[in-house]
Image (tube, grey):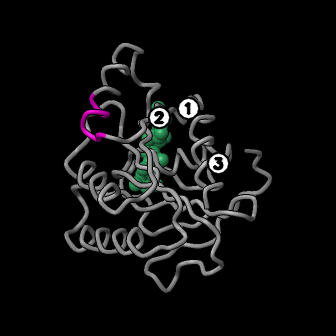
């Protein structure tokens, strides 16, 4: 897909802030620090459009980015960061569940997991939730540039076993590995609408 325009539209802290123009939406979901904002920037080849950070918990709202004036990317806050308060963790659950369950414009959920680690309990829970609710989704294994080919192969098998039934795409925001494949899937989901 040729990206002619990509712009940050708004940060939403609850349902009343969601966009209302009915354009299709693609959500980026995963653990804190897994590389959601980096994946979004890498797909769009726009450095710094979504803010990235070494500090987990950087993204704390649902951030809407309008692409080619025809669909949105939504960058969700990460889950599973131990150091945030209980209230914040609770808020994450409420905000994400509300969004995932009720958002009619959501055509695709991209679930990110770190290619270097086995999926966590929360990763598995989110995956089951997406499956159970019949959400069109696939999995992106991030930071693959940090693994040797051999280790990556083993790791991908592990991820496929832990998150059964979903397509898994190996990605690196550093090198752009996997970019074409992810765009193909995004294109398919937009066409289906
Ligand atoms: N080597 C490498 N580093 C990456 C990759 N993707 C992300 N990172 C790094 O991982 C850290 C976290 O990336 P973010 O994109 O901010 O992660 P996030 O999932 O948006 O984090 P939260 O917003 O806190 O939930 C940053 O330091 C990134 O530079 C990748 O593919 N390769
Ligand atoms: Mg982020």
Report whether 73 appears left or right of 58. Answer: right
Q: Which residues are magenta?
A: 158-164
Q: Quick check: 141 left or right of 75? A: left
Which of 58 and 119 lies nearest the eye of the viewer?
119
* Number of the front mark, 1 or 3: 3
Q: Which residue is mark 3?
A: 187
Marks 1/2: CA distance? 7 Å
Q: Which mark is residue 178?
A: 1
For the residue carrying disc 2, how many other residues have a C-alpha within 10 Å: few (<14), some (14-19), or many (20+)?
Answer: some
- Residue behind label 1 places its C-beta within 8 angstroms of ligand 1: no
Task: Locate residue 93, reporting x and y percent.
Answer: 29, 69
How many neighbours does mark 1 have within 10 angstroms: few (below 14), some (14-19), or many (20 or more)?
some
Crowd rating for badge 3 (residues with CA inside 10 Å; few <14, some 14–19, many 20+): few
- Tell me if label 1 and label 2 are in contact, CB under 8 Å: yes
- Point out the quarter of the image occupied by ligand 1: top left
Could you tell me residue 157's position as x and y percent?
A: 31, 26
Residue at point 49% right, 59% down?
Answer: 27
Instruction: Give the CA separation, mark 2 to mark 3.
Output: 15 Å
On whether residue 124 falls in the magenta region, the answer is no
- Determine the residue positioned at 65% across, 65% down: 8
Which residue occupies 63% across, 34% down?
180
């Amino acid at each position: 897909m040729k990206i002619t325009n990509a712009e940050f539209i708004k940060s939403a802290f609850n349902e009343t802030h969601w966009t209302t123009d009915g354009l299709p939406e693609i959500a980026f979901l995963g653990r804190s620090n897994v590389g959601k904002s980096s994946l979004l920037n890498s797909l769009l080849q726009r450095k710094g459009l979504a803010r990235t950070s070494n500090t987990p918990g950087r993204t704390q709202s649902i951030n809407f980015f309008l692409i080619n004036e025809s669909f949105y990317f939504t960058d969700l806050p990460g889950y599973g960061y131990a150091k945030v308060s209980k209230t914040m963790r609770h808020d994450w659950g409420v905000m994400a569940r509300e969004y995932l369950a009720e958002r009619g414009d959501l055509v695709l959920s991209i679930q990110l997991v770190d290619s270097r680690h086995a999926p966590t309990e929360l990763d598995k829970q989110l995956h089951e939730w997406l499956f159970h609710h019949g959400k069109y989704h696939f999995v992106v294994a991030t930071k693959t540039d940090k693994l040797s080919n051999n280790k990556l192969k083993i790791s991908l098998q592990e991820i496929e076993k832990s998150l059964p039934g979903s397509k898994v795409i190996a990605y690196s925001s550093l090198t752009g590995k996997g970019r074409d494949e992810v765009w193909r899937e995004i294109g398919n989901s937009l066409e289906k609408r």
